[in-house]
Amino acid sequence: METINKRKKIFTQSLIRSALWLGLTIIVFAGLVKLSFWQYNRGFEKEKRAIRITQLNQQSPLTLSEIVKLSQDKQFTGKESINDFPVTITGQFNDDFVFLLDNQVENNSLGYRVFQVVQTPTNSVLINLGWVQGSIDRSILPDVTPLNGQHNFRGHVRIIEQGIMLTAQDFTQPSWPLRVQQIELDKFSALISPLIDKPLLPFVIYVDPEDNLGYKKNWHPMVMPAEKHFGYAFQWAALATAWLILMICLRIKTQKSARVSSKNAPDALQNI
């Protein structure tokens, strides 16, 4: 009787270990495969976007009014929308409001991106003028001379993707130039509304790198090219395969050890 109970206990423990092994193997494997597919899809999206940017740059730039009309007429809903469209702008820079986007790195140097508002007869839009270096002392902001007067320049439309922020930005007592952690066009519109009656358009214009207006133009349409995403997809897939092989090998090894132990158990019980 004692031998039967012992075997039942060993069998139950084996079932539990098998279930835990199977669950852990599937969860980790599925997670790695999911990451691989996610990176592959991102690479595919970037590849399509790169082709689209090339095609758009071969076209004549639109005016800001044409961009707005195009957006309204087509009522874009996908990620592409009017993103990356080349645009030419003639407008008045407002020197009352300068936004400094914090934590922008260039060649291991920490700095800011400088944004100002341009007004046209029908619209107001936020303009990315480029990168300036910051001070080691975080209380000291860079010495930026705001642009003013009317300018004609070229740029590209950029749809701003909102990142995760632990705390909301507080603009109840702004001082200019205003250091910000993220571009939030709705809040910026409310902030400048006393002097600018037209709300900011729901996108930003990045000044063309070949234009001498502004500061250092160190941006690229895509921070990470499609090739890197495909490389990461392969790495995650390789890790998933390696994990599966490792877990199968460990399972075979533990089963062999368990069989040896179960064979020795009856002999040990007989000797008691």
Image (tube, grey):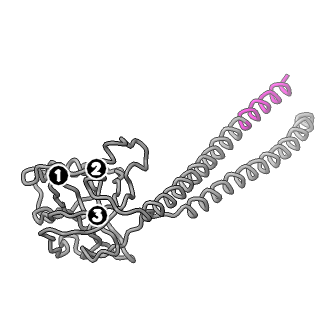
- On screen, residue 57 above or below 162: below
Counting residues from the N terminus, which is met first, the one under dot 3 or under dot 1?
3
Residue farthest to the left?
194
Magenta run includes residue 229: no
Say what amino acid the circle numbered 2 marks: Val
- Residue 77 or 252: which is nearer the viewer? 77
- On screen, residue 150 above or below 68: below
Q: Which residue is mark 1?
A: 122
Which label sits on residue 88? Answer: 3
Name the quadrant containing residue 269: top right
Counting residues from the N terminus, which is met first, the one under dot 3 or under dot 2?
2
Counting residues from the N terminus, which is met first, the one under dot 2 or under dot 1?
2
Q: CA distance from mark 3 to mark 2?
A: 13 Å
Which label sits on residue 68? Answer: 2
Secondary structure found at label 2? helix
Q: Is residue 251 left or right of residue 202?
A: right
